[in-house]
Image: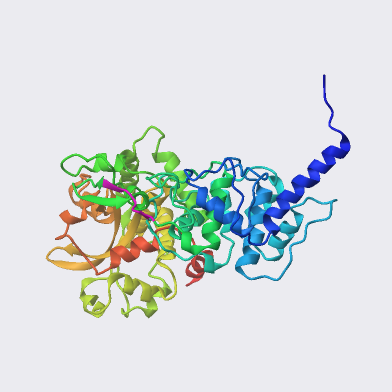
Amino acid sequence: MTHTIPRSTRLTALITSLLLCLTAFLMPAAADDTPAFTDVTPADWFFQSVHDICRTGLMIGTSATTFSPKDYITTAECVTLLARMHARITDSTEVLQAAPPTTPWYQAYINYCTAHALLAADMQMLVSDFITQPMSRAQIIALFSALPDSVWTEINSVDAGAIPDVPVGADYEEPIYCAYRCGITIGIDAAGRFNPDQPITRAEVAAMVIRIVDPTVRQTVTLSAPKIKLFAADGTTVTVTREERFAYEALGWRETPYPAEFDAETALNAMPLYPIKTGYRTLDDMIDRLFARILTDDMTTYEKVSAVYDYLVTTSTYGRSPVSGSYRKIYKSSPYADPAPGLATPLRSKLSGYSGYDYFYIALNDHELESYTIMYATEMLAGKTGWCDHFSSAFAVMMRALGLPAIPLYVDSLAGSTYAPHMTSLMTVGGVDCYFDPQIEAVLVGRTGKNEHKRFCRPMAEMTDEYHVFGDDIAINKALFGTFVYDAEKMEKILKEE
């Protein structure tokens, strides 16, 4: 037999349930006679948190004798808690009234949070679409992060990357790490795991909320990021955190050792590829067409780099570019009265006091080195003749198109028994800084008729006699080309100069 509950009884039960829910957030601080819940015992880790939160009136039980600590809490209840905590922390005199019976009971709290700019765009969407659904542990931390800055006083040392299941770049990474550092939560186990996607329980919310409103009960923890040993292709090792690891791996460092001696083919084939276009369509289209001609999908990274390098070495000529005709107007402000091809040695003394990059920056005035490189790469691929600037710029830009971190670099290069200013290319391969110098290679090929890759992927440490580097030029150029961003306005200004 089916038993039907009378309509009046159901309505009374609904009203009683609603009042219980509202009272959970409107109740003033309770006396010491906090209800003794049958489902919360002194042996439970959350016993004191539940006791304390009920005394504040921010939460109460689900009945006169139960707290339901393992039940999940909904988005509506979390938003309500946010509103009540904000009002309490800011000593707001604003009274949060229950909404009229024709609207959801939680609407007044949503209105409060909206009026006080407590809901970020993603939270507004969450509240709108999942108001009656359980909230995850990560989501509630992100929601509560809108509370005033006074709440977020750091007391713990927690390294970036130290929380095992909240990796760098994860959703809500920043507020979760902040909560750990402030003692609002310290994880679910000794390893510091957070379990971010798990729905949050009433007991867990009670613990977080009481720590937010009462800093004296916050938790202490120290979490250090695990260290990882990485190897470079020359045998060098480094120990880094998980957060630092990605930057090293992008330069070819890896967890397993390379062969005993540096091997260009092994090192290049181990490199991750992150292709970057310049944004200058004329140049990018030329590179795409060239790659379609000289590269195939079945080539290894080493074979592709070799093909690009050999193309420049065997098809390009050292000399005045037929595209630019002569050095551009930008050189008029350089230390040279009339710079010769390759910035000839007799004028070297006029560079005293300038590093290589400082010289080029002065010569270019307010133009960025990236625009300089794009200009010379374009001229080299269009005219197939140019100075060292053209060779090195073209190689660096094409390596970026392949996905490898090459940069143009100004050095002093050995020419006979003296050194002359020169532009080469540098690329970190397998964690080792290596020179690639297609212009000098082209000169050597012209002399011997053989392409022996004498300036192809040569570790910088092996070439200290051939190249002298200026001060911080390598670090500066690497920083400039961290992301290859094309500045259209500056580029057009350069190309239009007579």
| 382 lies left or right of 311 | right
Q: Residue at x 60, y 57 (%)?
A: 55
| 244 lies left or right of 37 | left
Rendering coords of residue 309 (x, y %) = 31, 47
The type of colouring in the image is rainbow
Question: Which of these two is toward me, 134 or 68?
Answer: 68
Question: Which of these two is toward me, 338 or 38?
Answer: 38
Question: Which of these two is toward me, 195 or 262?
Answer: 195
Q: Residue at x 25, y 65 (%)?
A: 411
Q: Residue furthest left?
A: 417
Rendering coords of residue 242 (x, y %) = 35, 49
Q: Quadrant of the N terminus?
A: top right
Instruction: State how many labels appear.
Output: 0
Indicate whether 201 appears above or below 217.
above
Q: Residue at x 62, y 50 (%)?
A: 35
Question: Which of these two is toward me, 334 or 411?
Answer: 411
Q: Residue furthest front?
A: 33
Q: Which residues are magenta?
A: 221-229
| 72 lies left or right of 332 | right
Task: Decide whether residue 304 is among the magenta residues.
Answer: no
Q: Say which quarter of the image contains residue 5.
A: top right
Rendering coords of residue 87 (x, y %) = 65, 66
Q: Residue at x 31, y 74 (%)?
A: 339
Rendering coords of residue 84 (x, y %) = 66, 60
Q: Is residue 103 visible?
A: yes
Q: Is residue 446 visible?
A: no
